[in-house]
Image (spheres, rainbow, N blue to C red):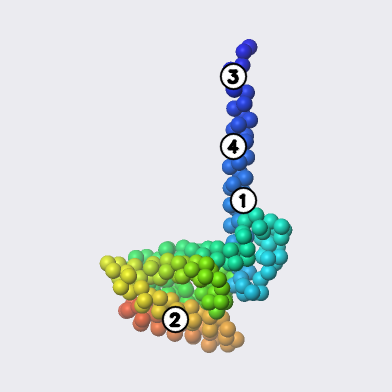
């Protein structure tokens, strides 16, 4: 039987295409694993206190694999900060309802005991703000862009028709909440720490104009 020209090469070509596609997907998945592991480690031990060797061990990889994905530790720091803020926006802001009801949800989720006690998976601002100010400009820009994404979600619920007009107010509320969370984490007196979170909720409601924010306990 005469075989059509090139037909025998088609399975091999498809196999190569699958290998290339798998290779890209695998590399992307590995890179994301490093980013997420670094984000948790940075919030636990600080940026300066987290070396490449530790970060790669957390990701289950060797040191030699680092430069396959990042040009430097600063590159990873900027990427991890952006990823952490995207995750925060997705888990706390994006899921909230529209309008003032959504503002109440955001405040209660942020200033909850669960968020305070889960620092590895929590707000990068409360954990790393002092270090971020000493980082490179790309890292500070990544942080700025990420925070504005979170802030704009708050502002859109505060004044849907003109969110930019209340961006500074939303940023002030976020700063107050981050400071409250940071201080609550530092206190050894659990009751006092819980009371501080509750007071922070009331303060945020007052700043944002949430009039019926006392309807339930912190989530």
Q: Could you say which quadrant of the image residue 71 lies in?
A: bottom right
- Give the Cα distance between marks 1 and 2: 39 Å
Packing grade of label 3 (10 A; few <14, some 14-19, many >=20) is few
- Choose between 25 and 113: the one closer to the eye: 25
Residue drawn 70% across the image and 63% down it? 57
Name the residue carrying label 4. Answer: 17
Name the residue carrying label 3. Answer: 5
Where residue 91 is drawn, which disc sits there?
none
Cβ atoms under marks 2 and 3 closer than 8 Å: no
Name the residue carrying label 2. Answer: 176
Residue drawn 58% across the image and 47% down it? 25
Cβ atoms under marks 1 and 2 closer than 8 Å: no
**Residue 38 location in percent, x, y?**
62, 65
Q: Nearer the viewer, mark 3 or mark 1?
A: 3
- Give the Cα distance between marks 2 and 3: 71 Å
Name the residue carrying label 1. Answer: 27
92 sits left or right of 163 in the view: right
* Lower position in the chain sequence, tag 1 or tag 4: 4
Residue drawn 60% across the image and 38% down it? 18
């Amino acid at each position: 039987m005469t075989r059509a020209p090139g037909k025998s090469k088609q399975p091999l070509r498809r196999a190569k295409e699958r290998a290339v596609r798998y290779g890209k997907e695998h590399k992307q998945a590995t890179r994301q694993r490093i980013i997420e592991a670094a984000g948790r480690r940075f919030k636990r031990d600080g940026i300066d206190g987290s070396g490449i060797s530790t970060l790669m061990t957390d990701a289950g990889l060797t040191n030699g694999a680092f430069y396959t994905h990042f040009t430097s530790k600063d590159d990873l720091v900027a990427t991890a900060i952006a990823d952490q803020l995207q995750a925060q926006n997705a888990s706390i802001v994006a899921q909230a309802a529209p309008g003032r009801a959504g503002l109440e949800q955001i405040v209660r989720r942020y200033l909850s005991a669960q968020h305070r006690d889960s620092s590895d998976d929590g707000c990068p601002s409360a954990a790393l703000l002092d270090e971020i100010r000493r980082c490179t400009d790309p890292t500070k820009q990544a942080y700025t862009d990420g925070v504005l994404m979170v802030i704009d979600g708050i502002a859109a619920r505060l004044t849907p028709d003109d969110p930019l007009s209340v961006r500074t107010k939303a940023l002030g509320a976020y700063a107050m909440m981050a400071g409250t969370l940071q201080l609550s984490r530092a206190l050894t007196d659990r009751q006092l720490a819980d009371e501080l979170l509750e007071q922070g909720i009331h303060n945020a409601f007052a700043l944002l104009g949430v009039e019926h924010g006392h309807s339930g306990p912190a989530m």
